[in-house]
Amino acid sequence: MAELMSYKPGLRVALLTVAVCTAFAAIHLSQNSLNPTVFVAVGEEDLEIREYAERLLDDVVLRPELGHDGRFFFVQANDPWLLDPEDNAEILDRPVYRAQRMAYPVLASAGGLLPPGGVVWGMLIVNVLAMGAGAWASAVLANRYGGSAWWGLAFPLNIGLLSEFNIGGGGVVASAAAFVAVLALSNDRLLRGSLLFAVACLAREVMLISVAGTALWFLATHRRREATLVVLPSAAAVGVWALYVRGVFPEEEPVGAGNLGFPFVGFLKNFENWLRDPFELVVGLVVVLVLLIFLFRAWRTPSLTAWAFAPFAALAFLLAEPVWNGYFNITRAVAPAITAYFLVAFATTAEKQAELERANPIGSWVGAPRKAP
């Protein structure tokens, strides 16, 4: 009962988030004859997926140029278990890379049971509910750190997650599952948190770095069993599904690390482009500042939330030029870190920060004396 009461502060934030996201979706739907394909983001110039969507649906709202990620998830959701790849997944630009992200298509299609017309509605509904779940978990975590539950709005107001929502992307589901997982683990719900992390990783495989950060937190606080049990479900789920996908596409080239490069190179190569666009320059510099402050706070006053999402801040400086090219890409890539930054930097009260600093486990790792609790 006490645990349920501790979740209560996030309910108003979650309900407001769902209401606002529903209103946002309703406005876009009303402007497009109530056609939910506006959130599938099929592009005018992606002729193959455009023909596929127009064959399965009565009418498709088209986006400029190639469109966005939603079009890939729509294809996947029509065959989420890759039972008929010849008519579905093979038209994807990178079948192995796309098929690895299966959680969102599975949820949006109700496990593959929905017809194409139901899938497009399922994609929208799942993302609305995921926004609410992420806001709820963020609000409860903010409350645990002594701040107002309204700091939970840092989840739905995150520019990266808003972009994901607008293009029918799977990043909302991945981030929401990860934040709910952290909340569950903070309540010592190890199995629940581990399974939610597995869902997050199956929605977006890079969420494995959050699992690694969480495991490091448990190791730093001398809980080796918990560290192992957090890693195993996510590693097993991602590994087994990856083997299955490569069995379906045995001739597909392996997915490389094309989005990664040397530290700061991607950022510096785009800096000249930012100078030509004041808006991009401001957003880019703000993102860099936020990530650096977040890393500092995670080191100085570490918490489970900080360590779970700080790896995204560190990863950002290894991202290649295409990812740093425009706020639309980089804010989606580091979206979990942006929300976590607000929880760590603003929702955490001075008293809680002092408590975290006194209990800082990093000192024991680097040989410095531990401060008395």
Image (spheres, rainbow, N blue to C red):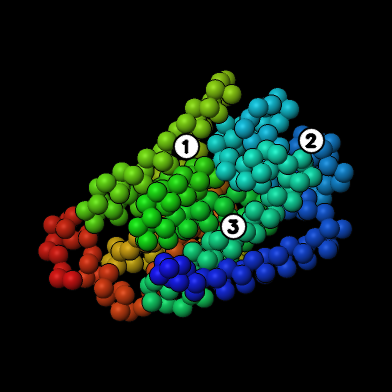
Residue 150 x %, y %: 52, 76
Asked if residue 36 can be seen in this view, the reply is yes
Label disc, if present, on residue 52 of the rendered structure: 2
Q: Earlier in the sequence, mark 3 or mark 2?
A: 2
Instruction: Give the residue at mark 1.
Output: 238
Question: Is 57 displayed left or right of 345 in the figure?
Answer: right
Q: Secondary structure at mark 2?
A: helix
**Residue type, label 1:** Val
**Residue type, label 2:** Tyr
Asked if residue 159 can be seen in this view, the reply is no
Question: Is 325 displayed left or right of 201 in the figure?
Answer: right
Q: Secondary structure at mark 1?
A: helix
From the viewer's side, name the closer residue of 7 and 267.
7
**Residue type, label 3:** Ala
Tell me which residue sits at (77%, 40%) in the image. 115
Tell me which residue sits at (42%, 35%) in the image. 236
Residue 48 x %, y %: 77, 34
Instruction: Give the residue at mark 3.
Output: 130
Q: Residues within 10 Å of mark 1 (few under 14, many from 20)?
A: many
Of the 4 image quadrants, the one containing the N terminus is: bottom left
